[in-house]
Image: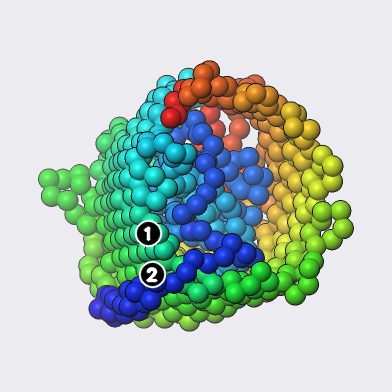
Amino acid sequence: MKERAFARYAQIAMIGFAGVPAFVSAQAAGENAVIRVTEGRLSGNAHAVLASEPINRLASDPSVSLSRMGGRGLDPVVRGQSQERVDLLLDGIRVEGACPSRMDPPTSRLSSALAPALEVRTNNRTLRWGPVAGGQVIATTADPQFNGNATTGQVTIGGSGNGNGKLVNAAAAVGSEQAWLRLSGGYDEANDYEDGNDNKVRSANKNAEGRADAAWTAENGFFIKGMVSRQEESDVKYAGSGMDAPKTDTDLYRMEFGAPVADGEWSLLTWQADVDHIMDNFSLRPVGMMKMQTDSTTQTRGLRFTLDQSPNSSIDWAVGADLEVNDWDATLFNVTGPMPMAASLMWPGVERERVGMFAEGFRRIARDVKVGAGVRYDRVEMDATRAGEMASMGMTPAMLYQSAYGTTDVGSEDNNVSGFVSSEWRLPHNQALTLTVSRSVRSPSVTERYLARNAMGGSWIGNPDLDTEKHHKAELALSGSKNQWSWKPVVWVDQVDDFVRRYQETSADTRYENIDARLLGVEMMVGWTDGTWSSNSTLASVRGENRDNGQALAQIPPVQFVQTLGWQRMGHSIEAQWQLARRQDRIDPLSGLDAGESPGYGVFNLSGSHPLMEHLTFNWALDNLFDNTWAPHVSRANTDPFNPDAVRVNEPGRVLRAALTARW
């Protein structure tokens, strides 16, 4: 598979580079595009972030829930869909995690030193990054803004009371908008925090990161942009797991070329992401009867070519092709004795090759009407190259798949066709009605198809025979504004054929199957501002149903409501936020994912930002002001010996966070 993959990789690269001379000589495109996607080259500055993980900023969006296992590695749930159904695109590149238990979800790769702007997509408004099954988190790192100066940068120093958190990060750039070099880095650490009942929660962690990126743009618009980064997580404790992560290292490399051509531009993006992860049950907790350790790695290589064109102010279209090659390997060792013994080949040398092509276009057919459509084809091949190797207990992964599902063929080939049709009508009184209908096809993940854990305490076995998920979505949204008010109600439905369901065959044995499912929901946003004061109310509700048996789907968040009240004047700002959630009693008790029913909660937060002088800003936050004990419904079941009675991993109790940021 690798030989075919890299042959196609080279072929796409040659096609892209062969056109460079012609593209470089082309004239710059006009600024009349109906839709423009920048893939990280241009973006507004992200807000200052006090927390070590930027994904925390999505907690204020009621359509997004964050699943907690420990102090790091918050896993987003978008409209009731999570894990492999939610992609992260970091400046256009896809990064995979290296932990079978998702201690390191892709969102943990987001930089705190260069906090990116975050956008959540729930349907196929564009297919250039692949189809949207559950959701896409688009993280965009802003280019440095020099404003006529030769240098620019920032330094942040901060800390938090609950858990004694400390953070320091910095970024400095030299150059101009046409050519620049930027260096950034940061370090943060925290001890175990306490929940609202003053119980300790295993959550201590350390994280260090460093990054260098640079860009050059010629007078004719041709540009080159590159990035290399290193992240080292260490001594990360997890209350929601029987293991901790003493080490996770991530190396990212990114290179992009592009130039104006005809009535638009072309771009060629290539990337590499390598993640090494170790988890065990003895480095950071008392040693039990057996010392177990899992060594796992994932490698991602990607290439994407895109051509955008806007021949006039009414038409915008794009075509492109991409290739992504992934390799996963994870082995569980028994290291109790002097010689480590392979207990399970959890990811038995899994390889995935994905080749895709897309075409999409948007046209304004009248002054107040815009329509769009797109189609995408993905060829996905997967194989477990070590499925025939013997682990302990005399079982190979291939034997486990056969005993669990009766399948003998571990290879898979998927031909996925996705697409969308959209329309937008401009209505009186600054209103717009948008309708999007889409089909998104997702191949099962490496864990869903190939996980092969077999131990005396139980088994967790993927299903190589799983069919692809087919999501058929419809979304209707009405956005508008009048005077000081704005609003946006949304209704949506997602009919899923061959939904991949995780279930427990026995209390100790986890399996996967295809079912038919339906998710539907409503969302509402109402905002008001007079320039000094502002108010924003948002509500989200989602219902997930297993259509095969009429029962609930797992990991569906309850009705959630967020109310914010803000004040700003002369650079100072203060915000009060009230997060509420209804109790959730619709669960899938056989999934192994829902930790039972959950009570409702209400949490009150305060935050502020204040300029102290021209280049110095003070930011603060007082989270969970009333020191409540609470946990999102989607968080992991608590296995923490500090807090054995908790159903889920509780959120921190009252937390005071503060930081000073100097910018120049």
Quadrant of res 72: top left
In the rendered structure, find residue 412 and report the number of the disc placed on it. none
Residue shown at the point (51%, 58%) measured from the top left:
38
User: Left or right: where does residue 242 sit relative to residue 10?
Assistant: right
Which residue sits furthest top? 612
Q: Relative to the observer, which residue lies in front, 214 or 474?
A: 214
Q: How many labels, in total?
A: 2
- For label 2, the crowd category at 10 Å Cα-Cα, with few meaning under 14, some 14 to 19 and many 20 or more, is many
In the rendered structure, find residue 24 and report the number of the disc placed on it. 2
Where residue 346 appears, as percent x and y from the top left, is 32, 60
Q: Relative to the observer, which residue lies in front, 596 or 46?
A: 46
Residue shown at the point (34%, 40%) measured from the top left:
174
Where residue 408 appears, as percent x and y from the top left, is 36, 80
Quadrant of res 285: top left
Q: Relative to the observer, which residue lies in front, 183 or 201?
A: 183
- What color scheme is it? rainbow
Q: Amino acid at mark 1?
A: Ala
User: Left or right: where does residue 388 sit relative to residue 378?
Assistant: left
Q: Amino acid at mark 2?
A: Val
- Res. 199 in view: no
Q: Relative to the observer, which residue lies in front, 582 or 571?
A: 571
Check if mark 1's residue and mark 2's residue have beta carbons within 8 Å.
yes
605, above or below 80, in the image? above
Residue shown at the point (19%, 54%) measured from the top left:
341
Residues at marks 1 and 2, CA–CA distance in whole angstroms: 9 Å
N-terminal-most mark, 1 or 2: 2
Where residue 412 appears, as percent x and y from the top left, is 40, 79
Residue underneath mark 1: 218
627, above or below 563, in the image? above
